[in-house]
């Protein structure tokens, strides 16, 4: 038999309104009263009817998260963080992946699920500002990543230039002088790859060191194979860096494999720094030093931005919120302790 609010109220000896305030997490309930009601909830096994609650507010209780690739560990971990953050507000998350294709990103952003979801969190790669200006869907949208749109949508990002400079500064502090960057792209200048390349150049220049094009490795994608191919091309061209800063951890892992095959030891011959702090980086034969974005903070800020928009509290013109990052130092730059 389903337990009702009335059952909980009678068990706790309080009013139905008090039980409702506790269930809905209102702040003006004393800690003692909240604990009393929660004990009754736990003992009776009460579960709120979330569907009815959301319908009373004119919502579905569902948001969507669209990322370029769920097979990429960074996006998989970020998705998990968004699901956890949304669950704190009794929100369900639908996952979608766009494969980083502009047409798919346009389709998602134009609200093909508008009748199903209350809001959308989108991490675009190819989407242009003009695509979003033509958006006629009124479902709240929050953008993730480092594309610069200057549009009235909240945007959650990290400072990629500062993060890249932190990584390169660490390599310089370890005595490295020939620091390569793996992960350059020849397209859109707003992409994180170019921002990280910019940070690499700025830090080398600030240290009075050369940043020649021969130390920049281009990639066609950002997976392990892409890092391996870029590293092999650089070595085959006779370029021997003593350190590598990679666009992401997957590119770094691919590069480390090629270095091993060529008889170069990490970090003694070549130090390596990645980006994203995926779990895989902690379990290789040599653990990976990496830039670690605060994925939990990114997820929390994105969910809270959507809820603020749904409550009518979004700022006109949108706002950019920056999540923190830190450098996690491991064996690929420090050696085995």
Image (cartoon, rainbow, N blue to C red):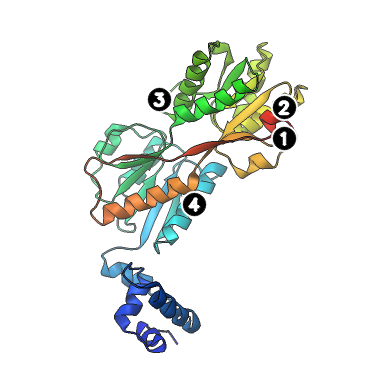
Label drawn at residue 266 = 2
Q: Residue at x 27, y 55 (%)?
A: 310
Up-down relation of residue 60 to residue 330 (above or below): below
- Label 4: state its secondary structure: helix
Visible residue check, residue 162: yes
| Mark 1 nearby-residue class (10 Å; few <14, some 14–19, many ≥20) | some
Label drawn at residue 286 = 1
Label drawn at residue 271 = none
Question: Dividing the picture into quarters, in which one does residue 211 lie?
Answer: top right
Earlier in the chain: of badge 3 and badge 2, it is 3
Question: Dividing the picture into quarters, in which one does residue 292 lie?
Answer: top right
Tag 3–tag 1 contact (CB < 8 Å): no
Q: CA distance from mark 3 to mark 2?
A: 32 Å
- Label 1: state its secondary structure: loop
Residue 140, image x and y in percent? Answer: 29, 50
Q: Which residue is mark 4?
A: 81
- Label 3: state its secondary structure: loop
Q: CA distance from mark 3 to mark 4?
A: 28 Å
Earlier in the chain: of badge 4 and badge 2, it is 4
Tag 1–tag 2 contact (CB < 8 Å): yes
């Amino acid at each position: 038999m389903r337990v009702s609010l009335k059952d909980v109220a009678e068990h706790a000896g309080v009013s139905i309104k008090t039980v409702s305030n506790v269930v809905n997490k209102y702040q003006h309930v004393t800690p003692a009263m909240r604990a009393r009601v929660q004990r009754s909830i736990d003992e009776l096994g009460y579960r709120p009817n979330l569907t009815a609650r959301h319908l009373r507010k004119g919502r579905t209780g569902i948001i969507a998260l669209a990322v370029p690739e769920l097979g990429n560990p960074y996006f998989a971990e970020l998705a998990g963080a968004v699901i956890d953050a949304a669950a704190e507000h009794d929100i369900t998350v639908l996952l979608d992946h766009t494969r980083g294709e502009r047409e798919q990103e346009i389709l998602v952003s134009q609200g093909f699920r508008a009748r199903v979801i209350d809001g959308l969190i989108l991490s675009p790669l190819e989407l242009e500002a003009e695509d979003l200006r033509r958006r006629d869907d009124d479902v709240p949208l929050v953008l993730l990543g480092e594309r610069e749109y200057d549009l009235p949508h909240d945007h959650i990002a990290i400072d990629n230039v500062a993060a890249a400079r932190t990584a390169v500064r660490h390599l310089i502090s370890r005595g490295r002088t020939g620091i390569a960057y793996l992960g350059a792209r020849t397209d859109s200048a707003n992409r994180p790859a170019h921002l990280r390349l910019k940070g690499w150049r700025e830090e080398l220049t600030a240290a009075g060191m050369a940043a020649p094009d021969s130390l920049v490795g281009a990639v066609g994608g950002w997976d392990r194979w892409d890092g391996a191919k870029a590293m092999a091309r650089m070595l085959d061209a006779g370029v021997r860096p003593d350190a590598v800063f990679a666009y992401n951890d997957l590119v770094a892992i691919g590069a480390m494999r090629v270095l091993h095959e060529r008889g170069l030891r990490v970090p003694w011959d070549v130090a390596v720094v990645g980006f994203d702090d995926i779990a895989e980086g902690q379990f290789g034969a040599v653990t990976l030093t990496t830039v670690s974005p605060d994925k939990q903070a990114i997820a929390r800020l994105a969910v809270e931005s959507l809820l603020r928009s749904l409550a009518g509290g979004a700022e006109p013109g949108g706002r950019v919120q920056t999540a923190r990052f830190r450098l996690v130092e491991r064996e690929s730059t420090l050696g085995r302790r």
